Image (spheres, coloured by chain):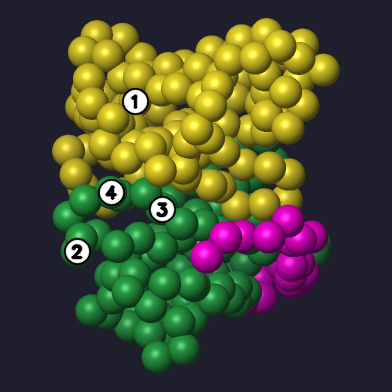
Chain colours: A yellow, B green
Amino acid sequence: NAGVMQNPRHLVRRRGQEARLRCSPMKGHSHVYWYRQLPEEGLKFMVYLQKENIIDESGMPKERFSAEFPKEGPSILRIQQVVRGDSAAYFCASSYRGLYEQYFGPGTRLTVT
Amino acid sequence: GESVGLHLPTLSVQEGDNSIINCAYSNSASDYFIWYKQESGKGPQFIIDIRSNMDKRQGQRVTVLLNKTVKHLSLQIAATQPGDSAVYFCAENLISSGSARQLTFGSGTQLTVLP
């Protein structure tokens, strides 16, 4: 009974490259959330998706960031032209059809050099 | 409200003692609260939740207390064990809105259990 899976666990990118972070929700979960965490801070909401729909992207930076959750396959958080300030841990959470408990994956630690 | 990049508050307790971790939440309209435990290098792990129509909820070795008057939440851990050492976050949500289900996280408390 696998939990939320994220890959890669660690990602190093040079400034200007693209970063793609993947999230597979728990089995049966159709709601996915992405959060970002800076060192010694709490998680900050970025985007909330259901299958093929973005429900709330109020926490996403206006430029360079995008997210999708296709009908088949994992949710993808994409960061174009990364900058040093994008270095953080990115966590994905999933929930079951509108229930409130969100279960988190292990995160992807992005380092921009 | 926005969390600020401050050093985490810390709490050190002796193994076997009870721990109390406090959290002040930001939105008086929030009606759902969760405590998460985050160990180093891992994602947040759900501990316990409580809705605003309750003021206390108990789980296994943990109790959450909610005081809506002063917007305060606390997590009590009984007989603290070394495996309880972690950062603890409270999170709030507004589920009655029926729309977005984003969680708003507090800044966290580092709990260290001393042998």
For residue B100, the mark is 4
The residue where tag 2 is placed is B96
Q: For mark 2, does the 10 Å Cα neighbourhood hold few (<14), some (14 to 19), or many (20 or more) residues?
A: few
Q: CA distance from mark 4 to mark 3?
A: 9 Å
Q: For mark 4, does the 10 Å Cα neighbourhood hold few (<14), some (14 to 19), or many (20 or more) residues?
A: some
Residue furthest out toward the bottom = B69
Q: CA distance from mark 1 to mark 3?
A: 17 Å
- The quarter holding residue A69 reads top left
What's the chain of the residue with tag 3? B
Above/below status of B10 relative to B88: below
Q: Are the numbered discs 3 and 2 placed on the same chain, yes or no? A: yes
Q: For mark 1, does the 10 Å Cα neighbourhood hold few (<14), some (14 to 19), or many (20 or more) residues?
A: many
Classified by dominant secondary structure, the portion drawn in magenta counts as loop
* Mark 4 touches mark 1? (CB < 8 Å): no
The residue where tag 1 is placed is A25
- The quarter holding residue A19 reads top right
Horizontally, residue A80 falls left or right of residue A15, namely left
The amino acid pointed to by label 1 is: Pro
Residue B84 seen in the figure: no
What's the chain of the residue with tag 1? A
- Where residue B78 appears, as percent x and y from the top left, is 54, 72
* Mark 4 touches mark 2? (CB < 8 Å): no
Residue A83 seen in the figure: yes
The amino acid pointed to by label 4 is: Ala
**Quadrant of the snapshot with the C terminus of chain A:** top right
The amino acid pointed to by label 2 is: Ser
The residue where tag 3 is placed is B103
Depth check, front residue: B70 or A19: A19
